[in-house]
Amino acid sequence: MPTPLYIPDMADPADLPLMLWLKEVPARAAGRGLGLAAGDILLAVNGRAFTGTPAHLAMRLAERGGKPLALTFQRGPNRLTVLVERADLGVWDSMAGAVIPEGDMPRIDPDSLSNWEIMRDGQGRFDAVCLGPSLLATLLPPLWLLQMRLWVPFATMVTALAVAGAVSPYAVPLVWAALGVHLRRAGSAYLRADRRGRGLRFQSVHAARSETAAQEAHLTNFPNDRSFFAPEPLPEVQAI
């Protein structure tokens, strides 16, 4: 069992509310794909302190009608927030603990966030992959592929558009639209495959409004890491 948080001095454990924590996250559990681990303590839902049972959490999710909630967990000295659509993230257990103080966390609007998967190599280089659909990928698929440095899919798309143009000018917008729909569904899979080919592996998931915010959340836990595509630091020049 992890160490309970925010226990007031001289508090009677019997008077404290029950907090949920993940006792185990099996390989097939929904929490495994979100980077959750055994010992993670559920602090808040949408930025507000949460106490109760897994059934209470499932009810909150049911009230959302399929839309996700933002769950904030404590892991050691760090916090991480992920979007979840189901309560069976792993094997839940309860422990006595005081809720986080009011105002300790800002309220979170889950509808403004996306889950970002952090992929990292052994040298501390990382990249953030959005797990949600991209509007840019849908509307401007070639530009999105260039921005994501997906060179092979970009070349394939340009070839497909060129062939469509040779057949009929009217075929180009149809192929463009079809490719946009395809990337909206499969864009994150292309990104994962490309980053794995570059030596990056799954590290964690952070719910964030943008790629920059996801990178900042990762750097909070790994301050010495740097973006995979950042320029190599210049070697230090030794004074003579």
Image: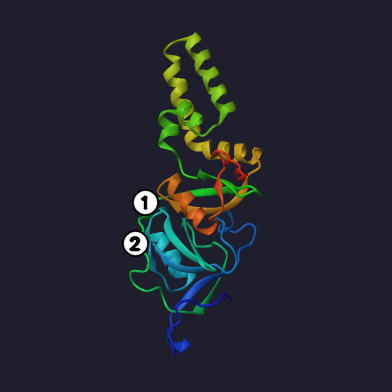
Q: Which residue is mark 1?
A: 111
Q: Nearer the viewer, residue 233 or 162?
A: 233
Say which element carries label 2. loop
Q: Which residue is mark 2?
A: 107
- Picture residue at 44% right of the left edge, 74% below the top: 52
Give the amino acid at mark 1. Answer: Asp
Q: Nearer the viewer, mark 2 or mark 1?
A: 2
Q: Is residue 43 above or below residue 14?
A: above
Q: Nearer the viewer, residue 40 or 105?
A: 105
Splitting the image into 4 quarters, where does residue 101 fall? bottom left
Say which element carries label 1. helix
Residue 190 horizontal/vertical position (percent): 57, 36
Q: Nearer the viewer, residue 205 or 237?
A: 237
Give the amino acid at mark 2. Answer: Arg
Residue 192 horizontal/vertical position (percent): 59, 41
- Picture residue at 46% right of the left edge, 44% below the top: 132
- Picture residue at 50% right of the left edge, 37% below the top: 185
Q: CA distance from mark 2 to mark 1?
A: 12 Å
